[in-house]
Image (tube, grey):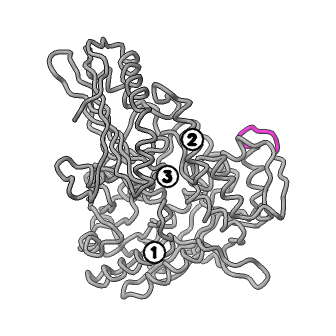
Amino acid sequence: MLDAPGSKPVLILGATGYVGGRLAPLLLERGYKVRAAGRSAAKIHARSWGNHENLEVVTADLFDEQSLVKAMDGCDTAFYLVHSMSPSTRDFAEADREAAYNAVEAANEVGLDRFIYLGGLGEKSADGPELSHHLRSRAEVGRILKLGCTRTTILRAAMILGSGSASFEIMRYLCDRLPVMITPRWVNTRCQPISIRNVLGYLAGCLEHPKTTGRTLDIGGPDIVTYAELFQIYAEEAGLKKQRLISLPVMTPKLSSYWINLVTPVPFNLAQPLAEGLANEVICRNNDIRDIIPQELVSCREAIKLAIARTRQMQVDSHCFDTGNACTPEWSIEGDASYAGGTVFKDRYAARLQGDIDDIWKVIERIGGEQGWYFGDPLWRFRGFIDKLIGGPGVRRGRTDPDAIHVGDALDFWRVVDVRDRERLLLKAEMRLPGEALLEFRLTPLWEKAVEMKMTASFMPRGLFGLLYWYAVYPFHSLIFRNMIENIAGMASVHMYERPKKLKK
């Protein structure tokens, strides 16, 4: 056995991602000490397992080598579960390359014994298409991690099937919304999907089986299927009519990614690399891991059935939408205007309410998703549609839980970056903008049963387009914010004895 529960902590880089967010509680359940690393400690603490007695939370950034040194110090093994497919002008492969080199340097400095990396399947075949940019990057990260002194185990997986996975969400929304699908030729490409349950079993098993050390091992489920067959399996398990698929050679993977972005909540930055990778056949070339870490393999049909059930029951342990920066921008901190390097625009509205602060807070924390925004929902949806057209997330991704809200949650085209019960909700915009935007809801008790409710929009523009954008949307704030405050008060059944007004400061 390599790492026994009760020894040194096991580091998880990417603890709030889709896989990391499920691996951490599994290891804790098995008795391991876990050190969860992320850019936002609050985002980790907000998880159901975020305050476990055997959990240590550290703040680390893959682009800050010294923060990685601190995170790795005292650990023998680190799971590397980080990928940089987030909205940015920077190429994700370049970012992943830099992050991997930083991790290697940090591991060499502290003498880390082992990396366990979850990569991707796929090889360039003589008669097949070029390996996609995404799959080449995943392979490159594995090669970089092996350059240092740290022994590296690479597990290569194809599509991961599970509630909340990007692949499952794309399939779910396409099948649910499109009885007839126009697809590219990749719909007939073969793949070997694997259930998230089996992925976690293999990752955790690597801690206990010495034979996995320093090896590259393919992991896959028991079925080899085409994507067309997967669509049909989903339709059958979801109780839908049989999917009609029309394959067109002119439908390229890039055009497919635009279509996926429009039809599903999956943003373009995630849809594009995934869609491009679908043209490559991804099948296990060796099954050695089945002998080393034996487990019951979940079929594609059973994995899809379980994922549908978990989604309908709203019991999704982690989600592809969890990936996002939940750190409050430094420019937004009061008294730090000099950091911004330019003008920070703010627009504030406030009202005084008479009633129970708990009732008001319950209405605020249900905002977005199916509930809507309490005023001007067609305007919010139109803004989301425009965002989708330019590659943003739009409003379709909704929210994880209709009643409760936590730091790190996706909320339509916002990210929750701060929650203080009955006091503050701070949202950071993830829509495509020429700048950075925040929306804050704050409740302040005044005297018995008297509460001030304040809404603040903050914007840090980038260049001329940022300034033009602020002045274009500024006139709508008065209409929208005043009515939102009034409707929130109405939903909370509290009396408004001072109507919403614009604050000068």
- For the record, the magenta segment spans 236-242
The answer to whether any part of residue 48 appears in the image is no
Label 2 crowd (10 A; few <14 / some 14-19 / many >=20)? many
Label 1 crowd (10 A; few <14 / some 14-19 / many >=20)? some
**Image location (x, y in percent) of residue 415:** 41, 46
Identity of the residue drawn at 48% across and 56% down: 18
Looking at the image, tell me whether mark 2 or mark 1 is earlier in sequence order.
Answer: 1
Identity of the residue drawn at 56% across and 36% down: 381
Q: Which mark is residue 396?
A: 2
Task: Place residue 355 in its image quadrant.
Answer: top left
Q: Which residue is mark 1?
A: 209
In the picture, which quadrant includes the N terminus? bottom left
Task: Place residue 27 in its image quadrant.
Answer: bottom left
The front one of 112 and 172 is 172
Query: Closer to the observer: label 2 or label 1?
Result: 2
Dot 3: element: loop
Q: Is residue 32 left or right of residue 246?
A: left
- The disc labelled 3 sits on which kind of residue? Arg
Dot 1: element: loop
Task: Place residue 129 in its image quadrant.
Answer: bottom right
Alpha-carbon span between mark 2 and mark 1? 42 Å
Identity of the residue drawn at 29% across and 27% down: 502
Label 3 crowd (10 A; few <14 / some 14-19 / many >=20)? many
Q: Is residue 91 left or right of residue 277?
A: left
**Image location (x, y in percent) of residue 395:** 54, 41
Looking at the image, tell me whether mark 3 or mark 1 is earlier in sequence order.
Answer: 1
Alpha-carbon span between mark 3 and mark 1? 45 Å
Report if the CB atoms under discs 2 and 3 are less than 8 Å apart: no
Q: Which residue is mark 3?
A: 432
Q: Is residue 241 magenta?
A: yes
- The disc labelled 1 sits on which kind of residue? His
The answer to whether any part of residue 382 appears in the image is yes
